[in-house]
């Protein structure tokens, strides 16, 4: 991780990190309740120093290292948007759990640039393994995830009540236009699950009062 002398107020921290590799590096960035990672949210320079190293670790053969690196980028959040391209590669990882973790992380690091991450997430809509991960991601992105409505509609037909409730949460979070939301809410109001029905009535009431 190259840096210029005096370019960052956390030079001592960076100096120590530069000598660490792999799991040892992650141990250090996770130390003190992830203090360095939280500092990245306020220091663009520090993020530029750490994010590339974390992205490199995403290619590790060690599954645990990948998860920890994704978690670190997730903690940094939108300040680590430079990592999007590296995280994207994990959407094709052979391990579906790694793919799910990548989906969650993209929704956080790409929060300020949804135009970059939404197309990547929408490519995974047809994979039923990722339905809930995508719904959570769209909930986090909010109204800028409106292109995810087809997934919400599909998830409302799930046999699992918790998935249907999650779909309603997503519908509410993305703030879909009433004309598009109405059919989904109407169907949900007669759902066999009482919690789904209650949530649907609650959301419909909000639309009516808008």
Image: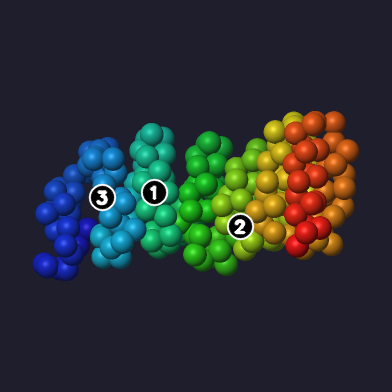
| Local secondary structure at mark 2 | helix
**Contact (Cβ within 8 Å) of mark 2 with mark 1:** no
Mark 3 neighbour class, 10 Å CA radius: few under 14, some 14 to 19, many 20 or more: many
Q: Earlier in the sequence, mark 2 or mark 3?
A: 3
Q: Is residue 62 above or below residue 39?
A: above
Q: Residue furthest front?
A: 209
Q: Which residue is mark 2?
A: 142
| Local secondary structure at mark 3 | helix
- Residue 4 position within the rendered picture, expressed as x and y whole percent measured from the top left: 15, 68
Residue drawn at x 24%, y 40% as measured from the top left: 31
Residue drawn at x 70%, y 52% as measured from the top left: 172
Residue drawn at x 72%, y 39% as measured from the top left: 165
Q: Is residue 117 above or below residue 33?
A: below
Q: Quadrant of residue 24?
A: top left
| Between 169 and 210, the one nearer to me in the picture | 210
Q: Is residue 139 above or below residue 47?
A: above
Q: Earlier in the sequence, mark 2 or mark 1?
A: 1
Q: Quadrant of the N terminus?
A: bottom left
| Local secondary structure at mark 1 | helix
Q: Is residue 157 left or right of residue 3?
A: right
Residue drawn at x 19%, y 44% as measured from the top left: 20
- Residue 176 position within the rendered picture, expressed as x and y whole percent measured from the top left: 74, 60
| Residue 36: mark | 3
Q: Quadrant of residue 159?
A: top right
Q: CA distance from mark 1 to mark 3?
A: 10 Å
Q: Which residue is mark 1?
A: 75
| Between 202 and 55, the one nearer to me in the picture | 202
Q: Earlier in the sequence, mark 1 or mark 3?
A: 3
């Amino acid at each position: 991780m190259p840096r210029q002398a005096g370019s960052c107020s956390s030079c001592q921290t960076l100096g120590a990190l530069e000598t660490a590799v792999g799991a040892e590096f992650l141990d250090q960035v996770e130390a003190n309740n992830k203090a360095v990672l939280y500092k990245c949210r306020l220091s663009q320079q520090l993020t530029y120093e750490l994010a590339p190293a974390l992205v490199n670790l995403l290619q590790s053969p060690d599954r645990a290292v990948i998860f920890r690196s994704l978690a670190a980028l997730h903690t940094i959040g939108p300040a680590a948007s430079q990592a999007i391209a590296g995280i994207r590669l994990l959407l094709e990882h052979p391990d579906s759990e790694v793919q799910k973790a990548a989906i969650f992380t993209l929704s956080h690091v790409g929060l300020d640039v949804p135009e970059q991450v939404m197309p990547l997430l929408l490519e995974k809509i047809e994979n039923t393994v990722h339905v809930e991960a995508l719904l959570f991601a769209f909930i986090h992105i909010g109204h800028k995830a409106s292109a995810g409505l087809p997934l919400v509609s599909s998830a409302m037909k799930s046999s699992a009540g918790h998935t249907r409730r999650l779909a309603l949460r997503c519908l509410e979070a993305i703030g879909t236009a009433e004309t598009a939301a109405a059919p989904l809410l109407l169907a949900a109001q007669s759902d066999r699950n009482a919690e789904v029905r209650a949530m649907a009535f609650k959301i419909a009431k909000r639309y009516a009062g808008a």
